[in-house]
Image (cartoon, rainbow, N blue to C red):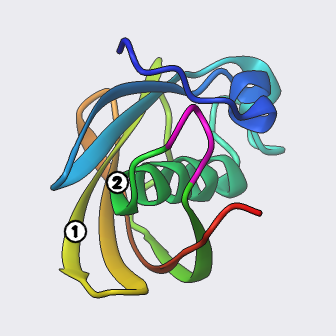
Amino acid sequence: MSEHIRNRFNDYLGIEVIHRDEEGCKVALKIRPELFNSIDGVVHGGVTSTLADVAMGHGAAPHVDGVQQCVTVESKIQYLYPARGELLEAESRVLKSGKTLIIMEARVTCDGKLVAVATGTYARVKQA
């Protein structure tokens, strides 16, 4: 993706923005052992939740000059299956967009298998 987004935490984890438009966002993360929980080969739930949050946040409001324009107000995730494999992806879509709040949904897959579904509320912010 040509758009540069500054986020040290996402860069540290290795999260890549694949696609973003006014309807949502798709992000990906190559799975590596440092992302496992105590069960070898299973991605930590916090990583899955983070990926969903990133997809929803990027989908809720476009970045301006690489800086996010919204923050998470609340989020919920339902884990359906353990994430085991090589590639974790999250794809978000806007459910409702208001003047200040945006309601989002994200579906997280691991090697194409649905492993989690998340919803979240995001608030637009003005930069100081």
Q: Which residues are magenta?
A: 64-68
Q: Disc 1 marks which amino acid? A: Val
Task: Provide residue 81's location: percent of width, then percent of height.
Answer: 41, 56
- Residue 53: say if magenta: no
Label 1 crowd (10 A; few <14 / some 14-19 / many >=20) = many
Q: Is residue 109 above or below residue 95?
A: above
Q: Report the side of 75 relative to 107 (left or right).
A: right
The residue at 75%/20% (across/down) is 33
Camera-side residue of 125 and 97:
125
Q: Which residue is mark 2?
A: 59
Q: Quadrant of the N terminus?
A: top left
The residue at 71%/34% (across/down) is 7
Label 2 crowd (10 A; few <14 / some 14-19 / many >=20) = many
Asked if labels 2 and 1 touch by Cβ distance under 8 angstroms, the answer is: yes
Which of the 4 image quarters holds residue 27?
Answer: top left
- What label does residue 94 carry, if any? 1
Task: Provide residue 111's location: percent of width, then percent of height.
Answer: 32, 27
Q: Disc 2 marks which amino acid? A: Gly
Mark pair 1, 2: CA separation = 7 Å
